[in-house]
Image (cartoon, rainbow, N blue to C red):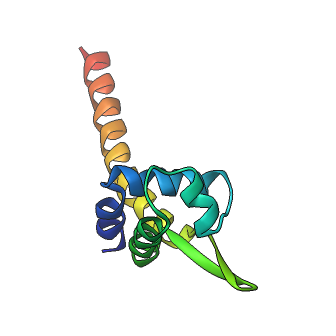
Amino acid sequence: MTYDNAITALADPTRRAVFEALAVKPQSVADLAQGQPVSRPAVSQHLKVLVGARLVKATPQGTRRIYALDPTGLIALRAYLDRFWDDTLGAYAAEVRRQSAN
C-alpha cells in the first residue's frame, strides 16, 4: 500500500513543508534546510522518510544529492484519493437523478 506510506509521511508538518518546497523546485539538503525551522540533519531524516514513501527521489549531482518529487508515490496517493472523489460525485449524481424523478 504505497498510499498508506505516503499519508503517514505527509502527516508530519515539517515533512509536509519539505515536500511542498520540493514541489516548487528540486533542491539539495542544504538548500532545503535554509528554508526550514529544523537542522540539516533533521531535514535529511525527513527526506529519508519521504524517499521511503516514494514521494521523493534523490539524484546524485557531483558530491551532493538533489531531491525532487517522485511521481510513483504521487500516482498511488492520487489514485487513493480519487476513489473517494469518484464515490462522492457518483452519490451526488444519483441524488440529482432521484430529485429530478420526483
Q: Is residue 56 visible to the viewer in this orientation of the structure?
A: yes
Q: Quadrant of the C terminus?
A: top left
Identify the residue at horizontal 36%, vertical 57% (top origin): 10
The answer to whether residue 68 is visible is no
Q: Specify the quadrant of the image occupied by residue 9.
A: bottom left
Q: Which residue shows up at 32% across the image and 55% down it?
A: 12
> Which residue is at a point 32% across and 23% down the rendered structure image?
96
Is residue 60 rendered to the left or right of residue 73?
A: right
Q: Determine the image quadrant of residue 15.
A: bottom left
- Image coordinates of residue 5 in percent, x first then y, are 32, 69
Side (left or right) of 67 relative to 36:
right
**Is 84 situated above or below 88?**
below
Q: Position of residue 79 (x, y in %)?
A: 42, 60
Q: So how many labels did they put on this image? A: 0
Between residue 78 and residue 54, name the one nearer to us.
54
Residue ranking furthest to the top:
102
> Residue 57 location in percent, x, y?
56, 75
Q: Quadrant of the N terminus?
A: bottom left
Q: Depth check: 52 or 30 in front? A: 30
Up-down relation of residue 77 to residue 87 (above or below): below
**Which one is nearer the viewer's eye here, 90 or 16?**
16
Write the residue at 50% across / 57% down: 19
* Residue furthest right in the image: 62
